[in-house]
Amino acid sequence: MVFFKKGELNLLWPFYFEFFFARILSLMAPFFIIYLTNLGFSLTKVGIVLATISATILIFEIPTGAIADVFGRKFSVLLGYALEGICVLSLYFFTSYYAILAISSLLGIAMTLSSGAKDAWTTDLIKKENKSLLNDFFANSAMFMSFSMFFAGLLGAFLVKNFGISIIFIATSLSFFVSIIVLIPAKEIFKKRKVHIKKSLSKLIHQSKESIKYSHKNKSLALLLAATGAISAIFVLNGSLSWTPLLLEHGLKFEYFGYLWSAMGLITLIASYTSKKLLRKNREKEFMLKSLMFFSIGSISVIFFKSLIPLIIILMIVIFFQDIQWPVSRVFFHKLVPNKLRATIGSIESMIISLAGIMVPPLTGYLIDIAGPSKTIVLAGIVTIIPITLIKKIGKKKL
């Protein structure tokens, strides 16, 4: 069986190389919270750092998006990677809380330069050169990123054990600079457009009003949007901010979080494959409810275990059911949204998810500080009843 289609590698090899090899060096995700707590910061302060990144991403998404439209997607991506690399490297040298907050703000802005522009760059290129490669590109990219996540965990475990935890910033910054070198020869299809930030903001406000108005009139969609917000908040509440201190409390060494990250990459692959195989037409609602129910049970069961291995097993179960419901929720969402309003309602959904990423991390950190990580995870499992109830109320009638 041929893995790549004819001409696919000639056109897209820089992107595949970047997705796999460059991202193997991206080590911040599994170790960043450990690093911050190791500096003596409370979990509340760590939550504020994470929320700061989310807030700047939300605020600067449109202004920085204009840069890609004026100067090109390639320019925006490479500039974003350069700034991200500099921000991450600076974390190696600055350890005061307010310096880290400032750097996190700049990091969020830099991330907006590359996030949407990267997809736009590759999509425009593929549609121009060979439309048949589009679906394969995104499928292959997801696979490469999952494998890079696996190997990044192994490399991270080795580097942290031998060079200390702050090595993650040098390695991660290097990943951005390697990405820049690899992507410089990549082709771009770009036509300069006139962009007005004020008009873009005005359009966003108009889209939001239209989406809210439509959702208010359609109960099923309103319920699903509310459930999406609740799910996003719960996944933050039951995320790395809670699990990291819990596993540290039970003796997991710093470097072993790299191995844990690798295991999570494999679980993500298995969950994606399973959801594709088990999903049946018009059964998305049932599938989501069952996934959330098992996610809830797994989260609540944390309270009954006090040793490391059972807790890691529960974590893998929780991640599996968290990941398995995501592609299903995408199908369910788009079935409830009419074509003419797909973009506008999609914008509202993105805002709801972003707001959860801003508001919930500080709350999560505060709860951990006063009640402990175990009880915080259990709380996440209990309040999962909220999105389950909302989804149950969604009617079968298509909009």
Image: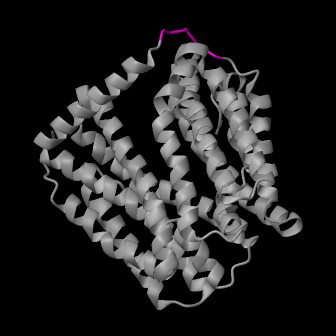
User: Quick one: quadrant of the C terminus?
Assistant: top left
**Residue 222 within the segment the image draws in magenta:** no
Quadrant for residue 108, please give it. Answer: top right
Residue 43 x/y as whole percent: 56, 69
| Rendered view: 22 above or below 154 | above
Q: Which residues are magenta?
A: 188-194
Which residue is pictured at 58% across the width and 63% down the height?
A: 46
User: Compared with residue 194, is residue 345 higher up or lower down, i.e. above or below?
Assistant: below
| Depth check, front residue: 264 or 80 | 80
* Left or right: where 295 falls relative to 259: left
The answer to whether residue 195 shows anywhere in this view is yes
On the rendered structure, is 84 left or right of 343?
right
Residue shown at 68%/28% (left/top)?
79
Rendered view: 263 above or below 345: below
Q: Is residue 189 visible?
A: no
Residue that lies at the very extreme toward the right in this rendered image: 162
Visual colour scheme? one colour
Residue in view at x 46 percent, y 37 percent? 59
